[in-house]
Image (cartoon, rainbow, N blue to C red):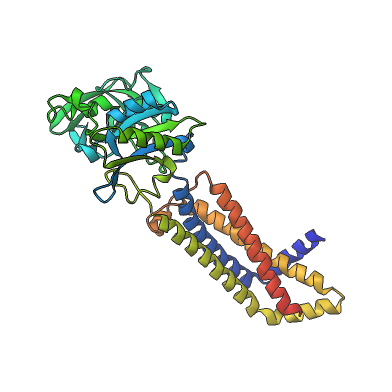
Amino acid sequence: MLFYHIKIGFKIIRKNSFYSMLSIFGLASAMFVGFFLLSDVNRMLDFDKCHEKHDRIYRVISDHIIYDNFRQPLVPYILATKMKQDFPEVEAVARYSIIPGVIGRVFVNKDDEFVDERQFYCADREIFDILTIPLISKESESFLSEPSLVVLSKDMAVKYFNEPNPVGKMLEIRTMGKIQQLRVSAIMENFPENSTFQADFIVNTDFYLNMFRKDYSNLEQTIQSWSFDQINLILLLKEDASEVGTNSKLDHLISSIEGLEDYKYYLQKLTDVYLFSQDIHNDFIEKGEISDLYVFTAIALLILLVASINYIIITTARLSLRHKEIGIKKVFGISTQSIMVQIIIESTLVALFSLLFAVILVFIFKDHSDLFLMNKVIYLGNNTLKVFILFIGLALIIGILSGLYISFQVTL
């Protein structure tokens, strides 16, 4: 019986092709824009979930209480050593820094011309144990053990060497007026767009410390000081560890150190960094607004609501034709219930056709939507299947509710 109603529904849609196409196009356009907006919501919620252990990764934030709670991710260099020694719940810890943001710009030599590169990081080797950074090739296991070594992203390998695997070759850079030679020791995959950590180049933290040697006469002693807060710290907690418990131990540690009475240190979950870091300074990363998430969701739902109402109006506009059709069906003994089911199926088919058309538009324009939609592209990430399922549900709800409204109008 259901297949019979579906078959009749297809015939009615073909018979009223102009109104059907008008309804499908209007609803599909709304679904396309709604999917774009919700895909950006998906992108924001998905940030940093590209790292396999994201639910256990944190960065350390320092809060200078007497300066209006001035928060930043820069902490003392020695803190990493202390946490390795005294925090058994910490599985791995790594220092890192974005060199152009903290010290100075870095220029890389390409065909005798120095190119300004903003994503030039330094990091401890343990960063590869914490974040998901696949290596395409490497010189040896000690690929980040010396300040003269550099790890390149796949794109940078091609950009500067015109080949995907330039391991062992030399890269010339200029920073703080000094030219240096670095040997390429490994090639890594490009970071996904929804990763806070966006390195194109990674050197050892000793490279970073060497930049301070002209300002600090005794650097080795300085990096043991709790006042030398010039480095970022990222850590991986063990599976049974508690963020609250680690914060409590961190409070106890900092309160016991002379000179840090006005500071508070705490962990910030990696997946919270993108949306919840507006009050954190000196981190030099892309940040989002939690308000955008709410606004985009509200606009998407509003567009879909307006499109649904518009669909009902278009369908209701031809009710006079349907009254004659319904009257004839009743004369031939077709029950009111059967007529209502037929109208609901017809309406649902139109909604599903609209969804199909919207999905086709998504795949056609997913790499070019930045040309006309807020300079952003459609994000197809980990939760995209959930978004598609949501739209299937919305299409069914729109079709069924619209069909119910129309069927009541023509049968009662």
Location of residue 407 (image quadrant): bottom right
Task: Please provide percent x and percent y for residue 202.
Answer: 31, 30
Residue 374 lies in what quarter of the image? bottom left
User: Residue visible at 24% across and 33% down?
Assistant: 258
Q: Is residue 70 left or right of residue 83?
A: left
On the rendered image, what quadrant is the N terminus found in?
A: bottom right
Q: Is residue 133 visible?
A: no
> Is 325 or 393 nearer to us in this picture?
393
**In the image, is 209 to the left or to the right of 233?**
left
Residue 331 image offset from top left, x and y in percent: 85, 80
Task: Give the x, y percent position of residue 58.
Answer: 41, 37
**Is residue 329 among the parts visible in the rendering?**
yes
Is 241 on the left-hand or right-hand side of 347?
left
Residue at 69% in and 82% down: 320
Q: Residue at x 17, y 33 (%)?
A: 175
Image location (x, y in percent) of residue 41 = 47, 53
Q: Which quadrant of the structure image shows residue 410?
A: bottom right
Closest to the observer, 131 or 361: 131
Split into 4 quadrants, where in the image is the C terminus? bottom right
